[in-house]
Amino acid sequence: MFETLKPQPVDGIMAIAKAYREDPRDTKIDLGVGVYKDATGLTPIMRSVKEAEQLLWEAQNTKVYTGLIGDPAFGDAMIGLVLGDAVPRANIAAAATPGGTGAVRQAFEMVKMARPDARVFVSDPTWPNHISILEYLGMETLRYRYFDDETRGVDFDGMMADLRQAKAGDVVLLHGCCHNPTGANLNTAEWDAVIALLQETGATPMIDIAYQGFGDGLDADAAATRKIAASLPECLIAASCSKNFGIYRERTGILMVVSADTSAQALNQGTLASLNRLNYSFPPDHGARLVTMILQDETLRANWMAELEDVRLGMLKLRETLAGELQRLSGSDRFGFLAQHRGMFSLLGTTPDKVKTLREEHGIYMIGDSRMNIAGLNLETAPLLARAIVDVGV
Ligand SMILES: Cc1ncc(COP(=O)(O)O)c(C=O)c1O
């Protein structure tokens, strides 16, 4: 039976990770796979997470199933973290999912269930898995302009012109903060203009927020999401705990559906439970329970916030070091965008040939579209990267 299958495309990021592992040079630099790394190249378990695990190990006396939407306390804790008090709790349906990817997948499924003809507008570029999942689900996908190759900032006029084509019954997918892969983000006035446009067109926003706390701080990173949720009658929010809690393999995420009133909330809540049941029944619990414990306990929460802030400031320092070195070596300000970008990634904005030269001649591994994971650097390697970027003539 399976001879009818066609080989699936190899994930580009995994292929780069493999090539990096096989490179014998000890000067090699890994800017590929999207996980946070400390200055020694490790992806550490956060101390607050370890502490919560210890407490959980001591206190937990059953591993019986939770509910189909996960532990409601996780929903409450995450709604608080992402939305604060922007929207009445009674208007929000929420379900735990396997990671942010699970939330994205369930969100698309819910849209397809409600509106089989919905078109989904995604930024060009976006996290490639958005497009893969949409294609797999057979949903119509349209790309809106996002990245300005010249300034390496947001092509805001292009974005607005393209989003003007969206209409009621369509979905506009936005990255809540720390855009992946570009690192370029909207400012407050631009978010306001997008909100006004969504109000005008009637299209439904879907926000993917996978890096809250990695950009300008926990609240600042959620500000756009909160404003959208408060300003529009409906929105979908897919949030991941993988990065900001460093619990990648625990598969912890949540899908929230904000509606204008409580009767829609009940229908949405039932739909989320049903979608979980249909796809994997109960969502993973371990990571969700750790997140709940951390967010609910004053000390654990304060420790986690301090650790996350260190991570954020460390990445900002790396950005400034890299941009500063590039300015010194190139004698121009054209790499200043690296210090303006936020989150783990920046799109360098160069050709696949130059990405290849950086890999082959300098042992620097970035994704083929020139996405760099800034957390793959440290204060010693940032100047080496700057020198290589100038040498290959980016
Ligand atoms: C934009 C975006 N959304 C969602 C995810 C999903 O993360 P996870 O499923 O690991 O929680 C990622 C992870 O790389 C991402 O970059």
Image (cartoon, grey):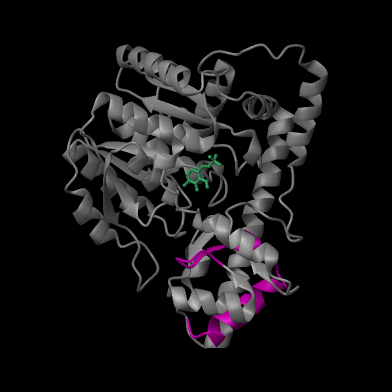
Magenta stretch, residue numbers:
366-394
Q: Determine the residue positioned at 35% across, 29% down.
A: 109
Left or right of 67? Residue 94 is left
Is residue 134 at all visible to an observer of this figure? yes
129 or 373: nearer the viewer? 129
Residue 189 rendering spot, x and y as whole percentages: 32, 52
362 or 253: nearer the viewer? 362
Is residue 344 at all visible to an observer of this figure? no
Q: Determine the residue positioned at 60% across, 40% down.
A: 242
Residue 30 rendering spot, x and y as whole percentages: 64, 65
Q: Determine the residue positioned at 41% across, 36% down.
A: 226
Residue 271, located in which quarter of the rendered image? Answer: top left
Q: Work out which quarter of the rendered image holds the N terminus and state it.
A: top left
314 or 203: nearer the viewer? 203
Residue 23 rendering spot, x and y as whole percentages: 69, 70
All told, the count of numbered labels is 0
Left or right of 383? Residue 345 is left
Question: Is residue 390 magenta-colored?
Answer: yes
Say above or below: 191 vs 90: below
Say above or below: 295 vs 153: above
Say above or below: 234 vs 3: above
Residue 40, located in which quarter of the rendered image? Answer: bottom right
Q: Determine the residue positioned at 54% across, 80% down.
A: 357
Residue 295, located in which quarter of the rendered image? Answer: top right
Question: Is residue 73 magenta-colored?
Answer: no
